[in-house]
Image (cartoon, grey):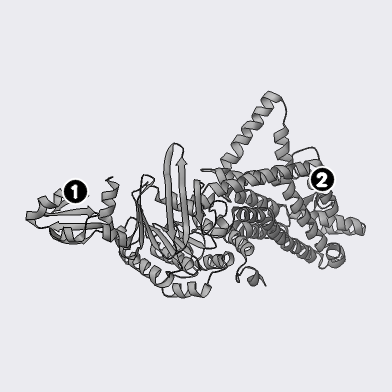
Amino acid sequence: MLASIIKINGYNPFKALMLREYWENRRAIFTTPLVITGISMVLIIISMGLLGRSINIDGHSYTLNEMIANMSAQKAQDISAHINHILMVSTLPIMIGAWFCMVFTALGALYDERKDNSILFWKSMPVSDLQTVLAKLLNVMLVIPFVAIGFTVIFQVFLLIVGSFTTLGTEYSAWDLLWSSTNFPLMVFSEMTYMIIYGLWALPIFAWFMLVSVIAKRTPLLLATIPVALVILFETLFFQSEYLARFIGMRLTGAHIFGTDDGFGLNFTSLGAHTPLDIIQSAAQPEFWFGLAIAAAILYATILLRKRNSL
Amino acid sequence: MTNIITAKNLNKSFGSFQALKNINLTIQKGQIVGIIGANGAGKTTLLNSILGLSAYDGDLNVLGLDPYSQRDELMKQICFISDVATLPKWIKVSEAIDFVEGVHKSFNREKALAFLAGTTVPLDKKIRQLSKGMIVQVHLALIMSIDAKILVLDEPTLGLDIIYRKKFYHQLLEDFFDEDRTILITTHQVDEIENILSQVIFIREGEIALEANMEAITEDWMMLNPTAQNIAAARALSPASEQTMLGRTSFIFNGKSRAELEKLGDVSRVNLSDLFVILMEGK
């Protein structure tokens, strides 16, 4: 099945453009989450299995056996919430890795092709600049996070298997305690909803990265950050306000989604406690649509500039 | 004959530098057109305008389309190789074939594979692992398997050795060209393409110095190698240029009758590189 997805059979520009992104960004899309997942698995096996380290959750320190004993004393609903929380937190290394891949892929999206002159090859194909920019945006905002989510599922299953092993020889049932408490489809659906809504909140920032990638003569990262840092500094010094910093910070951290208006920083404790509906509801805020309008304007400029800048 | 490219008062400036000055041009179907000029004369600028890669002032019509605003539509019918370095380094040969098949309706995969089978290019290697000659072959295989109406080649053989260059033009004529297609070529190796061209356009400082088909050039321009006693007589006929090499003097004439010149010595056709030098020196 996978082979038929990544194989071209005849005319299919959308597929060809998305495959091009995959070929070009295989490391960001696939290798990075694969490596992070692998390293996480090895670390867990070493630290818990071989070294017998206890783990810290919400300020308490547990060995796995203690945790299981502790959990099985709770009500079924609490167990489920607990496990969901653990499993959601466990995805952070992969998702943070994916986030960096999103940023750097966006910054290189329209820069690398100019740097190696291949833009002339891409432009010799009957593909519009609109299609190209949209394919690149889709790759950054959906493909990279969704592949990463796939790896988080693998990692979560791995955690449950590890957990199941620790129940062996105890009176606790791995099925009751772990597997039946875990609603994988819902969890994956929540993660996907979260990434889509997150992507839409953060779209103006990522659109900015794309715009920078189309105009940067060299090092898009510097062009994307330094002028913004200067404007923030200017704003703080002369206007005693921090609108831009808040605009960027809250959108990049997804603070709007959970209504945590305290600004910067993910709220780890609330991870897993939100239903897809809670997440989608954040789109009712006017700032959500304001951001999308800004993103649309920036992307429009990006498309025009790609049309103009052939070299 | 149908005009496939028409330019009227085409202008293009980069800041205060005017790269194209009032270019008027028509190119008809079924021609192999050489665009010849010194470095910086505006050849690539002209081609980029025709390809929709840069904006311009004036009227330009390629296959009934406005190149700049309808580039993606135009590229269904035009192929171009701008330079050997333009295939992305990270792409595998097989992926490049996949991509072109995906975006081009008229791409013939079998043709591309058959073409590559006749070379030593490995399909599973990335472009960065191939030699320069192989990269050109890959690009050519892709381009020639597209059923395009116009092929634009901007210095296609730059940096290739003579064997590859010969092979390149041979394959171009054998496998691609027919009377429904048009080829535009720029190159510095004028001599190599001279005998395949049917039309030439000389560009000098953003202007067209001469546009003519090859027959007209052979009729209008002649080289005379006069016998020693006729040198003065030849010079009196106001030649476009005079050259002395190894004790032999030769003249190039524009618009003289062949019979008149043959009285003074051997008359032969002028090759394009000599004509190029005359035109560029601004006579």
Residue name at image x 43 percent, y 45 percent: B22
Q: Which residue is mark 1?
A: B238
Q: Are marks 1 and 2 on the same chain?
A: no
**Residue mark closest to the camera, 1 vs 2:** 1
Provide residue A95's location: percent of width, then percent of height. Answer: 70, 53
Residue A258: give its label: 2
Chain ID, mark 1:
B
Circle 2 SS class: loop
Provide residue B210's location: percent of width, then percent of height. Answer: 34, 52
State the residue lying farthest toward the left: B229
Q: Is residue B114 left or right of residue B209?
A: right
The residue lying toward the viewer, choosing from B147 and B7, is B7
Q: Is residue A141 above or below residue B91?
A: above
Look at the image and tell me in which quarter the N terminus of chain A lies: bottom right
Check disc 1 and give the amino acid type.
Ser
The residue lying toward the viewer, choosing from B26 and A107, is B26
Location of residue B258 by image quarter: bottom left
Q: Is residue B5 above or below residue B105?
A: above
Provide residue A150's location: percent of width, then percent of height. Answer: 71, 61
Q: Is residue A275 visible?
A: no
Crowd tier of the residue under label 1, counting other residues whose Cα lies within 10 Å: few below 14, some 14–19, many 20 or above: some
The residue lying toward the viewer, choosing from A215 and A142, is A215
Q: Is residue B94 visible?
A: yes
Circle 1 SS class: loop
Q: Is residue B188 left or right of residue A311?
A: left
Crowd tier of the residue under label 2, counting other residues whose Cα lies within 10 Å: few below 14, some 14–19, many 20 or above: some
Check disc 2 and give the amino acid type.
Phe
Residue name at image x 31 percent, y 62 percent: B215
Provide residue B214's location: percent of width, then percent of height. Answer: 32, 61
